[in-house]
Amino acid sequence: MKSIRFACIVLIVLLFSACRKTDAQDKGKAPQKHPQPALFVFPSPGAYDAATTLSGRLKDSLDHTVNNLFRMTGMPGLTAAMLAPGKGLWQTDTGYLSKPDQRKVNPNSVFYWASVGKLLTATVIEQLIQEKKLDREDKLSRWFPALQDARKITIDELLMHTSGIYSFNNDPKVFAIDRYYSPDELLGLAHAQKNLFPPGTNWSYSNTNYLLLALIAEKTEGKPFDELIRDRIAVPLHLTSLRALKPHEQPANLAVAHENGQIVKEDYSVPLGAGNIVSNASDMVILLYSLMTGKLGPVAQVHDRLKDLYAMPDTGTWYGRGMMLYDFNEITNTDDLWIGHSGGTQTYRALLVYDTASKTFIAVAINAHISVEAVARKLLSRLR
């Protein structure tokens, strides 16, 4: 029985690892759309108690599952958290910040959340829209008139990845050497390439879109992006581990990426707005719970972020306005949806989602290229 269980887990891990891609553009993807999920699948605020720590058999089962996954996958380090209705908050931070140096994860450690950070960038933009400081139809030319099609591209098209702007991370120079790239340098890389299509006519994932959104937020508020994340999200929600990295910032308590048993040096402060968030999983779970229950803006506005969902490269994944939808009817032929965001690099993976079937929030980050989707599904299965 144990060998069968092991084989099933390995199969799931391989399945998700094979179908998940890194945060890269998909050139020429047809703009298929997914129906907006119904508002009734959203969580009920009164059903959750994040102040209560999960205990008992379910906690033991989740802890045991994590221990088994470490043995099976050889992952270096992990942060994971779950907030389930009527059960409280479970979290674990374990493994190594740096395995070669034998530096272990501790309660003060943070992990990198890659493109999950886009969810936060979009949330700040939506708050500014709610405050009438921005409008979804505002043109990019208001701030960046020199960019291609700037008089046509809207904030909404940046949010939805329908701008056609080239993604700076597709330029091999960004990965050729280990150094910091400023926002101006990244914009220069994107500006040097022709736009992929006229704005609003197609869909293509682009980190440049969210870099521009972060810069627009900075110009609108007169504050650096890290302060906007602190003042609008981290402080109001009492998220003590969550922050946007400042330029060149390399926290000493950050779990570093691993590949083939060795650490990989990366400057996670580079993709401003597109993926420069560090945190533990517990704070990320509370973030998504707070967002979907109206603590960071009207629930109707959050629901509206799922109104226009475009097909992503991976089967069953769809993109709205800084939020993703996983439709498992297309992946595993089951009636389940995940709402949130995922992200990663060749050496790091992260996931933050709300599971509509169990009404549970879950966050997982691993400092290696291991399927966080498979880990999340295994942990959620403990609820049954």
Image (cartoon, rainbow, N blue to C red):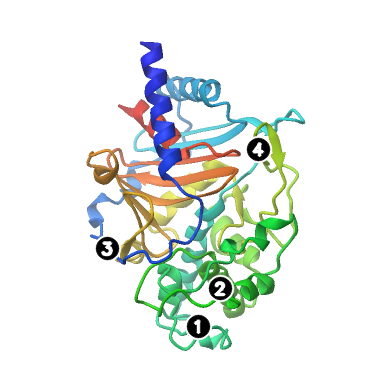
Check disc 2 and report its element: helix, strand or loop.
helix
What amino acid type should be assigned to the residue bearing mark 2?
Answer: Leu
Q: Looking at the rendering, which quadrant does residue 135 occupy?
A: bottom left
Q: Is residue 283 above or below residue 206?
A: above
Residue at horizontal 57 percent and vertical 34 percent from the top: 78
**Res 31 seen here:** yes
| Mark 4 to mark 1 CA distance (whole Å) | 38 Å
Check disc 3 and report its element: helix, strand or loop.
strand
Which residue is under mark 3? 33
Q: Position of residue 245 (x, y in %)?
A: 67, 57
Which residue is under mark 1? 140
| Mark 1 to mark 2 CA distance (whole Å) | 9 Å
**Res 300 seen here:** no
Contact, mark 4 vs mark 2 (Cβ under 8 Å): no
Which residue is under mark 2? 212
Task: Tell which circle, 3 or 1, labels the residue nearer the N-terminal end.
Answer: 3
Check disc 1 and report its element: helix, strand or loop.
helix
What amino acid type should be assigned to the residue bearing mark 1?
Answer: Leu
Whether residue 150 sits left or right of residue 299 in the image: it is right
Q: Position of residue 96 (x, y in %)?
A: 67, 31
Contact, mark 1 vs mark 2 (Cβ under 8 Å): yes
Contact, mark 3 vs mark 4 (Cβ under 8 Å): no
